[in-house]
Structure formats: C-alpha cells, structure tokens
Amino acid sequence: MKLDEIIISKAIIESYTDKLVAALDVDVAIAGAGPAGMVCGYYLAKAGKKVVLFERKLSVGGGMWGGGIMFNEIVVQEQGKKILEEFGVKTRKYETGYYLADSIDAVSTICSKSVHAGLKIFNLLSVEDVMVRSKRVCGLVLNWSSVEMARLHVDPITMRAKYVVDATGHPAEVARVVERKSGIKLNTKTGKMMGEQSMWADVGENTIVKNSKEICPGLYACGMCANAVFGGPRMGPVFGGMLLAGQKVAGDLINRL
C-alpha cells in the first residue's frame, strides 16, 4: 500500500478537531494530568460522566515518573495500594504499612486505564484563565503550551464545564488565577491561598485528602494543589494521598452531578 502524506495529515487534523470540539462543553474539566488528576478523571469517566483533562506538558504523570530523586520507585500506604491494585499496578510490600510500585508501571497503567474508561486527555494545552459567571467558575480558557512558552500574543479559546478541578500540583495554578482575577473569596481561613508548608509526610498524606474539596463555587482542588490552597505540608515521594484525593473528589462530583 502506498502512503499519502496529505491523507495522513487530514486524518490527524480532522480527528483532533472533532475531539477538541466535543471537549468544549462537559460535566467536569480537570487541569493537570498528575496521578490525582488522572485518578479523578478515571472514576468520573467510569461513572459515565463527560470529563476532559488538560495537561500543559508533552507527557502526563506529573512527579510520579521520577519517584524520589529520580529513583523510579514510589511508596504508598495500605489505602493507596488498594487503588493501584484496582488499576492493575503491581505492588510489593517493603515493611508493614509501606508498599512499593514501579513508577513507570504506575503512570502508564493509570493513564491507559483512564483513557479506556472514557477520560479525554489533551496534552500540550495550558490553562491560562477561567470562565466565571455570577461568581462561579464554569469553564477554562486554553492556549497551546508552545504559545505560552514563546510568549506569543495569540488569543486563547474557552471551554465550559459544570465543575472544574485544579490538579496542577504545587503551583495550584487555577486557584491562583481565581484569587488574582475573579474577586471570588476562597473557602480558606483567610479567603485566599494559604500556601504550601514544608515537608511532613504523615500530616501531608492525611491533609491532602481532607483538603481535596470545593474551594469556591464550581472549582475543586485535588491532590497536592489542595494542600497549597489550604496551607498543608507537602509529603514528598509518597503517593497514596494523591490517589485517594483523586478518588474522593470524583466521588463528591459524581454525587453532585
């Protein structure tokens, strides 16, 4: 069979355009394809919700790829182990209460299972702003990551969602945009971003799940972003809380939808 480059190009352009148009009006839009964001998207898609995830980088997985100091092993506790095993990720007991998994296996398997469940993931798209109506977050403003990196003056596009999830990790990028530009008061003690505290794995793992919740009308924090919003400590290369946070926010949203 002789291959035609124009047919190949048309196939990519037409297919991607259809996929992006379908993603412009959804139940839930997630910013950030780390473990918390993908797990959240997996459970929402599995429940039959229309959910889309935008990741600014070429690859998904956030900090999970590198484990600790680029040693590609991750540690989870008992509850996190159960979620990994639900996805089909192999785990190994290190000692009581501590389980290991290969980070490459974890990221690739979570991503694959999430997409197969119906989650639509768009990489290389950055969230640069939010859509707000009547003091409620109801969508995202998107641009190509390459436009952002090159600082080009190119206008973005907007998509609508019944709920938005900020899973952008330490920077809490969506929450910061809301705080800076919308005039909306956040559901924190100060009404503003509290900021992330220094590492404390034990406390961080518990608070990351507790803090993964609605932070203002229409916007949820999920994963490490939640501790940055509510002032919890970071927890380092232990990932159970990230998985549990994604599961929790998905459950909350499924009930509301």
Image (cartoon, rainbow, N blue to C red):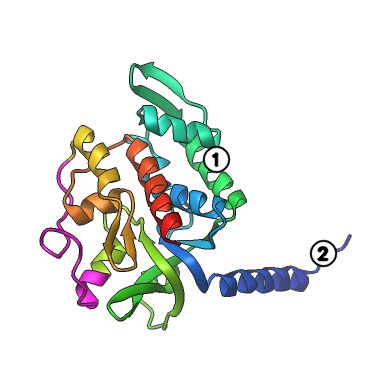
Which percent across, then down, holds residue 112?
58, 46
Q: Which residue is more in the foreground, 77 or 64?
A: 77
* Up-down relation of residue 141 to residue 245 (above or below): below
Q: CA distance from mark 1 to mark 2?
A: 32 Å
Q: Secondary structure at mark 1?
A: helix
Which percent across, then down, holds residue 48?
57, 56
Q: Mark 1 highlights which residue? A: 109
Outermost residue toward the top?
95
Q: Amino acid at mark 1?
A: Thr
Outermost residue toward the front?
255
Q: Which residue is more in the foreground, 188 or 127?
A: 188
Is 104 on the left-hand or right-hand side of 184? Answer: right
Rendered-image quadrant of the C terminus: bottom left
Q: Mark 2 highlights which residue? A: 3
Is 9 on the left-hand or right-hand side of 146? Answer: right
Magenta extent: 178-198
* Up-down relation of residue 207 to residue 171 (above or below): above
For disc 2, the neighbor class at 10 Å (few under 14, some 14 to 19, many from 20) is: few
Q: Which residue is more in the foreground, 4 or 115?
A: 115
Q: Amino acid at mark 2?
A: Leu
Q: Which residue is more in the foreground, 1 or 213?
A: 213
* Up-down relation of residue 52 to residue 144 (above or below): above
The kind of secondary structure the magenta stretch mainly shows is: loop
Please tell me which residue is depicted at 24% across the width and 77% down the height of the picture.
182
Can see residue 62? Answer: no
